[in-house]
Amino acid sequence: MHHSKPDDDYDYLFKVVLIGDSGVGKSNLLSRFTRNEFCLESKSTIGVEFATRSIQVDGKTIKAQIWDTAGQERYRAITSAYYRGAVGALLVYDITKGVTFENVERWLKELRDHADANIVIMLCGNKSDLRHLRSVATEDAMAFCEREGLSFIETSALESTNVEKAFQLILTDIYHIVSKKVLDNDGSRPEVGKGKDIIVIDNQESEEKKKSGCC
């Protein structure tokens, strides 16, 4: 019988940031992946919040700490702290709103200015359930990703399509880079550390969890 590990028992802790315009569904991707919830009435995120979930990759327990922020310009001041220590980024746009895809370039520039050079970036076209309203062609997004060296996926937080897969893929990519680094460094401590080395959490987490039920 397989007992699940206690919450603080993990091999790696990876911080992944969600970025993209306001309203593209970042918070719902976060809640779908970490709590399997979706809120049609969700409000704009003010400031920053994060949630965690552990998954298994190659027999290792990877604890993902997913950070979500308001996409509005007026919260831009949080950037450097927000990106600090992030090993992955999910760059999200809305397949029904062309402008959110046009802005991907700007978000990418922001990532490249503020985040670690080796950050793993996945472009994510969300709201794929609204096919009849699609205004961004899958091919265009794929071509962009090819040019920029990003991975790509289309998701629906509403229908729960590919959300699990998106996070699994990005976390697996990060794990492979990090575990390779560990070997390259003859086992000395890699920059993207083994879980216990890079805890950037204060203990608000459990307090927050108690306070925030569902919407």
Image: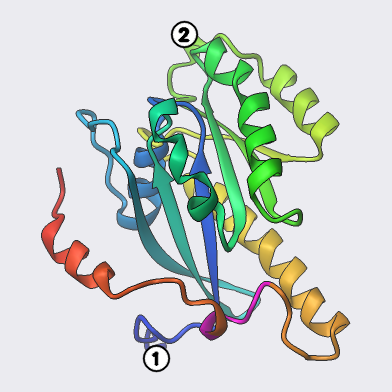
The quadrant where residue 194 appears: bottom right
- Disc 1 or 2, which lies upstream in sequence? 1
Nearer the camera: disc 1 or disc 2: 2
| Tag 1 near tag 2, CB within 8 Å | no
Residue 162 showing in the rendered view: no
The magenta stretch is: 192-196
Looking at the rendered structure, the secondary structure element under dot 1 is loop
Verify whether residue 48 appears in magenta: no
| 138 relative position to 8: left or right | right
The kind of residue on which mark 1 rests is Met
Residue at 55% of width from left, 52% of height from top? 83
Nearest to the observer: residue 51 or residue 1 = 51
| 52 relative position to 152: left or right | left
Nearest to the observer: residue 1 or residue 43 = 43
Q: Position of residue 41 (x, y in %)?
A: 19, 28
Q: Considering the image in quadrants, where does the N terminus appear?
A: bottom left
Q: Position of residue 207 (x, y in %)?
A: 18, 69
Q: Is residue 66 above or below residue 79?
A: below
Label 1: which residue? 1
- Number of numbered discs visible in the structure rendering: 2
Q: Position of residue 157 (x, y in %)?
A: 40, 37
The kind of residue on which mark 2 rests is Leu
Q: Position of residue 93 (x, y in %)?
A: 53, 26
Q: Considering the image in quadrants, where does the C terminus appear?
A: top left
Q: Main secondary structure of the magenta part?
A: loop
Residue at 32% of width from left, 43% of height from top? 47
Q: Is residue 206 above or below residue 28?
A: below
The quadrant where residue 112 appears: top right
Residue at 64% of width from left, 78% of height from top? 193
Instruction: Give the CA separation, mark 1 to mark 2.
Output: 47 Å
Residue at 12% of width from left, 60% of height from top? 211
Label 2: which residue? 133
